[in-house]
Amino acid sequence: MSDKQNKLSASLKKTAPIVIGLILAFVLGMVVRDAIRNAGIGKDTSDAHAHEQAEEAKDTIWTCSMHPQIRMEEKGLCPICNMDLIPLDTGDGAGLSEGQLSVSENAAQLMNVETAPVERRFVSTSVRMVGKVDYDETRLSYITAWIPGRLDRLYVDYTGLPVRKGDHMAWLYSPELISAQEALLQALQAGKNMENSSLSLMQDMTESTVKASREKLRLWGLTPEQIQQIETTGEVSDHMTIYAPTSGIVIHKNAMEGMYVKEGTRIYTIADLSQVWVKLDAYESDLRWLRYGQAVEFTAVSFPGELFTGTVSFIDPILDQRTRTVKVRVNVQNTDGRLKPGMFIKAVAQAQIATDARVLDADLAGKWICPMHPEIVKDGPDSCDLCGMPLVQTESLGYVGTTPLDADKPLVIPATAPLMTGTRALVYVQVPDANRPTFEGREIVLGPRAGDHYIVTRGLAEGELVVVKGNFKIDSSLQIQAKPSMMSMSQLPEASMHDPKMMMSREPVNPEFKTQLEELFAPYFAIQSALANDDPAQAALAAKQALTALSSVDMSLVAGDDHMAWMKAGKALKTSLSQAAKTQDIKAAREHFHQLSQALTSLTKRFGVTSAEPVYQFHCPMAFDNQGASWLQDVNDIKNPYFGDMMLKCGELTEVIKAED
């Protein structure tokens, strides 16, 4: 190796460590600089995030999901029900009108808000009626004396006996029969004497006399066979046999053997039970759904589980002022004779509703029907096979024509959508195209209820979404914000409901009955107080006292619908009180108290109170696994009987029942 190469190698060995050291120092400096910079940025970001969290926590309002009137600045427990408070979504209220509420998607889910479209559709309803089986008046026959005389024998001597047409019924003595029969025989003899006479005028007169004598005997009740026998034998009798003019059951026996009768005296009444009438009581609010010729299904107590059918043949034009019902008559075939007059009947008429209170019936659409005999239905104009009357179109009786149109479909909403306040109805409509769930209250005009739907007369359009579940929660939120709601509907456009069920008036209740009914309040309030104190023994004792008060109520003081309402609720009162008086189990006692409260509340609202002190109704939405339950108190201080000391103050005042002025 040359000297020059040796010098270069020695120089590299000296400078290499220096170069490597400089490179390492540079890299280390870059790493330290980045670390310092990142540390500074992280500190700034952490401080900013912590500041935002503090500001957000400072602005958060906490509320109770069951009692939205509770608002706290800090997280904690509800002072009413001890539930954990949740953050209140204040939302963005900008741009909302006075009656609108906007909530977040999460809040809408927590409120269980459900909507349904306003739609046009045929809806069905069931008209329930009760009544009795009765005779068909058109199939009643009377056996009367067509000639004065004496009843020497009655072959049918008791009622209920079935007879056939032509059966002998009675043997009548009448001296007048002799002269009438002799007149016939004399006329016949004169006719024979005039057979060879050339005087045609005399022959005609004799023949006329014979016809008149025969007609007289026929009008007195003699059959053609009896008259022929008189002419053949030439013998007269002062007795005649009266025969049954039709088959049926003898339902009345009006005479006795040996009794003298005059012309027209009724002896028997015969009813043909091969067809019967079922007379039903229909409430005036249900009359809009009943039509002549409509099919009716019914059951009889005597044949449980068996379904009978009939046809509406008559709707009484007069309303019973006492019961507020109208008689509806149904024709029923009864060839086997199982339906007997007097049997109790429960009937249901199904009606598919169209606009203008018309009814859709596929079997009668476009048909022609007899106005006297609804069983006679034909495809075109014709005459009735039974009475000869001209048939009429079913459309004239309130039925929809052959081809229903969309215009025939009524505008309807689910029955859970409207909130009722007296004669007014309020619905909450979802505002379309909103950034978040937004609802507005709207007062509407309702028509009648049809099953699970209400017919809308005015206030909604097809396709709009109405709240069918959670509307009470929306309403309570608006109340808290002092916006128009169900409790302040005077701020909304005025409207009224056209539902006779809600507008129907009834006679004043007997004050004595009210006084007797209010004797139940004291032991009832004692039961409520005992359960609020978790004392089932004291509740059972108070239930026994309530049973004593219940037995003193005179149900004869009320009549009509009030009587039926008392019978139904009174039975529930007795059942729940009897069970409550026997139990020492707090859970069972509260279940019986719930049934008791339902019955007593319905009676209190129906009949009112006479006391100067009001009765307060409270509701706890969490009772019985969030199904909710109500109760009555004599003081406006919540004491929850369904939870007792666990959640004594859980609940809200829903109504104050006061005496009428």
Image (cartoon, rainbow, N blue to C red):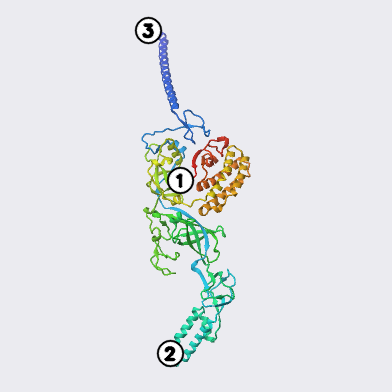
Q: Name the residue under label 3.
A: 4
Q: Which amino acid does label 3 sit on?
A: Lys
Q: Mark 1 points at which residue?
A: 416
Residue 14 image offset from top left, x and y in percent: 41, 8
Q: Of the numbered discs in the image, which one, if any, rests on residue 202?
A: 2
Q: How crowded is mark 1: few (under 14 residues within 10 Å), some or many (20 or more)?
A: some
Is any atom of residue 470 visible in this view?
no
Q: Which of 397 and 493 is in front in this view?
A: 493
Could you tell me which secondary element the residue under label 3 belongs to? helix
* Residue occupying the point 55% across, 62% down: 342
Q: How many labels does the image show?
A: 3
Quarter of the image holding residue 237? bottom right
Could you tell me which secondary element the residue under label 2 belongs to? helix
Q: Nearer the viewer, residue 93 or 24?
A: 93
Left or right of 609 in this view: 494: left
Q: Label 2 vs label 1: CA separation? A: 91 Å
- Dot 3 or dot 1: first in sequence order is 3
Is any atom of residue 515 visible in this view?
yes
Q: Label 3 vs label 1: CA separation? A: 108 Å
Q: Does 29 sit above or below residue 131?
A: above
Q: Of the numbered discs in the image, which one, if any, rests on residue 35?
A: none
| Image quarter in which the N terminus is found | top left
Q: Which amino acid does label 2 sit on?
A: Met
Q: Does 580 sit above or below residue 289?
A: above
Which of label 3 and label 1 is nearer to you? 1
Is there CB contact under 8 Å for labels 2 and 3? no
Is there CB contact under 8 Å for labels 3 and 1? no
